[in-house]
Amino acid sequence: MINSGQVYSSIEVKAEIERGNDELTSWMHDNASDSFYYAIDDDVLAKYADTQNWARFNSVFSDIARQEFATVADAYLVATAAAKGLTLVTYETSDPSCKRRVKIPDACNAMGVRYCDLNTALREMGITI
C-alpha cells in the first residue's frame, strides 16, 4: 500500500519514528520511500496554524496538553489530511472533554477532516484479511 501510493504520512511522523531508533525505524527505512511522506508545504503550514490555534484557544485542554500537541506529529497529521483532502486513520477515539491530551479525532472534527480506524480504512479499500 505504501509503494502503490494508497497510503501516506507526514514527514513529521518520519522524524518521530527516526528518533525512536528501533525496529519500526528500521522497517520504515527499508519499506517507505520518501514519496510516502507529505512534505510541509504552504497549504499544510496554514492548516497546521489553524490546528494549533484551535488547540491553543480550546479551554478544555490543560497547558501540558497544548504544549505536547505542539511538539508531536499529531497536529501535522491533521493538518496534512486537511490540506490534501485525505482521511486520517487512527485507533484513537474522540473525547472532547479530555483535558490531559489533544486527541486526533477531536482535532479532525475541529478541522473538518474525516477520520476512521484501520479496519474501516481497509474495508473501504476492499482489503480483507
Image (tube, rainbow, N blue to C red):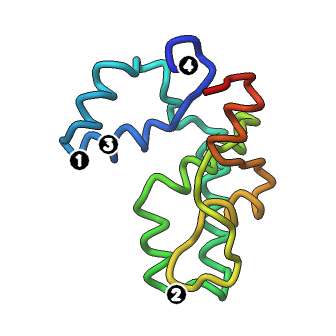
Q: In this view, does 95 lie above or below 36?
A: below
**Residue at 44% in and 36% down:** 11
- Mark nearest the camera among 4 and 1 is 4
Lower sequence index among marks 3 and 4 = 4
Crowd around label 3: few <14 · some 14–19 · many ≥20 (10 Å): some
Amino acid type, residue under disc 2 in the picture: Ser
Residue 98 location, quadrant: bottom right
Amino acid type, residue under disc 1 in the picture: Gly
**x%, y% of residue 18?**
26, 40
Q: Residue 17, which numbered label? A: 3
Asked which secondary structure carries label 4, the reply is loop
Pointers 3 and 4 in contact (C-beta within 8 Å): no
- Mark nearest the camera among 3 and 4 is 4
Lower sequence index among marks 3 and 2 = 3
**x%, y% of residue 60?**
65, 87
Give me the C-alpha separation between circle 2 and circle 4. 37 Å
**Residue at 72% in and 41% down:** 120
The residue singled out by tag 2 in the image is 62
Give me the C-alpha separation between circle 1 and circle 2. 26 Å
Asked which secondary structure carries label 2, the reply is loop
**x%, y% of residue 53?**
64, 69
Crowd around label 2: few <14 · some 14–19 · many ≥20 (10 Å): some
Give me the C-alpha separation between circle 3 and circle 4. 19 Å
Quadrant position of the N terminus in the picture: top right
The residue singled out by tag 1 in the image is 20
Crowd around label 1: few <14 · some 14–19 · many ≥20 (10 Å): few
The residue singled out by tag 4 in the image is 1
**Residue at 19% in and 41% down:** 22
Pointers 2 and 4 in contact (C-beta within 8 Å): no
Pointers 3 and 1 in contact (C-beta within 8 Å): yes
- Mark nearest the camera among 1 and 2 is 1
Give me the C-alpha separation between circle 3 and circle 1. 5 Å
